[in-house]
Amino acid sequence: MAIKFRSFLIRAVTTVVFLPLFFFVVEYLGPYWFAGLIGVVAILAMLELKNLVSHAGSAFYVVPSVLLVLAMIGLRVWPVVPFETVLAVGFVLIMLWSLLADGRVESALSGAAHTILAALAMGLSLSAMVALKLLDIHPDGYPGMGADVVFTLFMVIWMGDSGAYIFGSLLGRHKLAPTISPNKSVEGAVFNIIFNVLGAVIAKSWFFPKLTWMDVLVIGFIVGGVGMLGDLLESLWKRKAAIKDSAGLIPGHGGLLDRLDSFILSAPLLYAYCRYFMMP
């Protein structure tokens, strides 16, 4: 299988255009602005999930799901109530919405289930990104730590995606999960992990020298590997919905959800690792 040059060129140009903007947002925007931007991303991602779920033939409740996700993100910068309180209220709201605003026997159960799953997937992952950024001001952190960790996460995931795409296209012979994502190969997955680790090594060598080599291995192998599984997870959802991309928002990349899929599992895992293993 050869690399599709036009597709690769579009992906490369899009990355080059958005990379400086991403650097500015993470490095220079304060936590409130960063959380606000992530909130906008969350709304767009939830609309894409609604489209995906609709293609799968299920109901989806946009209003309560967006409210819950935004509350989870906002709670990272304004911790006025415990996190589990927001989850409990959001759960109740979605259940009541399925009963009172929908109430259809054929759709209420699947609608509630899909809405809760989508809200948790986006809410936990995107709020974890905000929490990582807030390590800048955490009592056990240090100035710049949050930006370093966020850059490291994206470096690991993007390097892994690039390695999988390039070497999977060139060398891919054995299907990784043909019923879920026919284009993914075992060879691509191997190079995904190799480039995940390489991304963590670059992060340590370039801008995050406080990473230990144990951190590099954990973030590269485990966080990066889980990110790859998040990609497969979204592919499973799209296979059920019989769509190729969640949207056409980003040239060469599909929708926001197609770019966020690797972070659904990796961002919460990296946050947990930072809090319990990287900080005193």
Image (tube, helix red, strand yellow):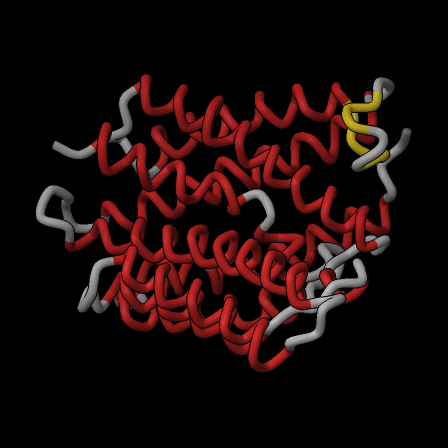
Q: Residue at x 71, y 55 (%)?
A: 253
Residue at x-position 47% and y-position 60%: 22
What is the x, y in percent for residue 247? Answer: 74, 65
Query: In the rendering, at what x and y percent does residue 70 appear?
Result: 41, 70
Return the residue nearer the eye: 158 or 124.
124
Is 92 positioned to the left or the right of 173 in the image?
A: left
Please state the horizontal and vertical placement of residue 202, each as a whole percent of the image: 43, 30
**What residue appears at the point 78 percent right and 31 percent down from the top-left corner?**
184
| Front residue of 16 and 263 | 263
In the displayed structure, would residue 7 be above or below residue 250?
above
Q: Residue furthest bottom?
A: 101
Q: Is residue 191 above or below residue 230?
A: above
The quadrant holding residue 32 is bottom left
- Residue at 38% x, 73% y is 36
Note whether residue 38 is visible: no
Q: Quadrant of residue 74?
A: bottom left
Q: In which quadrant is the N terminus drawn?
A: top right
Residue 101, above or below 186: below
In the rendered image, which quarter contains the C terminus? top left
Depicted 169 relative to depicted 125: above or below: above
Q: Quadrant of residue 257?
A: bottom right
* Foreground pick, 273 / 212: 273
* Extreme-left residue of the structure: 139
For the question of whether residue 32 can be seen, the reply is yes
Q: Return the residue nearer the eye: 31 or 205.
A: 31
Q: Which residue is at the far right?
A: 1
